[in-house]
Amino acid sequence: MSTDPSPDFGSVDRLEVPHRAFDDEAASLDAADPLRHHRDAFVGAETPLVYFDGNSLGRPPRATAERLARFVTDDWGGRLIRGWDEAWMDLPFAIGDRIGALTLGAASGQTVIGDSTTVLLYKLLRAALDAQMGRDPQRIEIVVGRDDFPTDRYLVEGIAAERGGRVVWIDVDTSRGVDADLLRAAVGPRTAVVLLSHVSYRSGYLADGPALTAVAHDAGALVLWDLCHSAGSVPVELDAWEADLAVGCTYKYLNGGPGSPAFAYVAARQQAALTQPVQGWMGAADVFSMGPVYRPADGMRRFLSGTPPVLAMVAMQDTLDLLEDAGIAAVRAKSIALTDFAARVADGILAPLGVTLASPRDSAERGGHVTLSHPAMRAVTARLWEGDVIPDYRDPHGLRIGLSPLSTSFAETLIGLRAVADAVRAESAGHREV
Ligand SMILES: *Cc1c(COP(=O)(O)O)cnc(C)c1O
């Protein structure tokens, strides 16, 4: 055991008061939460497991088990190949429009679901760069944050190499993200496309959508928003921002299940000018004429390539039903209340253990997760998973606390953060022993 009395992590005096106050606060926040009954709509809500990773893989709605079973017996089993004509050919657009209306501020005819986020990002970025280089051969630069999600950065590097483009990196503080000043310094007459994360996967920093879109447009660039950590959690107004392009995941806050297909948004005014490089039959003008040459379809169909993963589109529809019922504004209000509460609890019981907040403090600059930093967080995460408290870990030293508003309660948040405190204390004690 340690004989060093100074890092007195277990001091009852210091912990008891905030603990009791937080219990009362969690209870009253849950009692006043207009979305509290939605939590029971999710598998696992009845167990003591604490889930802090709905921003990475959302919990399944209970209704999904039945919806999937019904799909297999009635739709797939009953309709067989007729299902394509009757419903499935249209499903990527019908669900895309619903996602657009409920979460993206996108009028119909601009959103489709199909491939993975990575593949859709590739298709849209390539289309945007090619269109810009076609208009002005000087516009060869793709601007991206150096701390963006790996797939985004890797794609930008690959596309630049493939097309003779150039990458312009924006350096950012890893506890924040790209703001208007940083973007303004990076764009210019050579900028073709700007790729931006609306909510940073690492810090949870919430970028200013309309301001950054305007900065990109003032420089003559197109803007592509990555909405993976926004869709279903933070309201987005793509049409009002006058955004050009967007992509995002459906297996995070939209609870579509592991590997459910991503969505792509292309503003109506840009669709005719953009052609994507994966020219498959499902994106062709007349799918069943099977003509001798590829001619892209009008509208969003041209952004499809091959047969869409219909089975993987089934599950997300239950969360879209829940979102339609709750409204994205109420979801955002609860998200802010959850992350504010988590930050207060972290200040009360984790800051004394040396844990710092690696996310913006101001909720106006924060999405649906908070990141807590401490040198022991990698080991802390492993310890928490063993005890059925499930956050995730991101370098450097970051424990991500994802607070999915439809499926997370304030009491659950408090229990989980207490477990984090216990795990940090245990890891710190372990290190003092050696
Ligand atoms: C989760 C995430 C992705 C994931 O891409 P996949 O193709 O689904 O693996 C991409 N970008 C960001 C910002 C993400 O958070």
Image: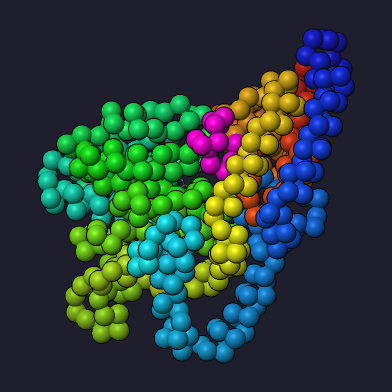
Q: Quadrant of residue 304?
A: bottom left
Residue at horizontal 32 percent and vertical 43 percent from the top:
213
Q: Position of residue 422 (x, y in %)?
A: 79, 31
Q: Give above or below for 80 relative to 102.
A: below
Q: Nearer the viewer, residue 203 or 390?
A: 203
Display coloring: rainbow
Q: Considering the image in quadrants, where does the N terminus appear?
A: top right
Q: Position of residue 387 (x, y in %)?
A: 79, 43
The answer to whether residue 4 is seen in the rendering is yes
Q: Nearer the viewer, residue 256 or 244?
A: 244
Residue at horizontal 52 percent and vertical 69 percent from the top:
313
Q: Quadrant of residue 420?
A: top right
Residue at horizontal 39 percent and vertical 32 percent from the top:
179
Q: Nearer the viewer, residue 282 or 416?
A: 416
Q: Position of residue 96 (x, y in %)?
A: 43, 66
The answer to whether residue 160 is seen in the rendering is no
Magenta part of the protein: which range? 359-370
Q: Quadrant of residue 77?
A: bottom right
**Seen in the image, is 29 located left or right of residue 364?**
right
Q: Considering the image in quadrants, where does the C terminus appear?
A: top right
369 part of magenta stretch = yes
Q: Nearer the viewer, residue 373 or 151?
A: 373
Q: Position of residue 218 (x, y in %)?
A: 22, 39
Residue at horizontal 42 percent and vertical 28 percent from the top:
172
229 part of magenta stretch = no
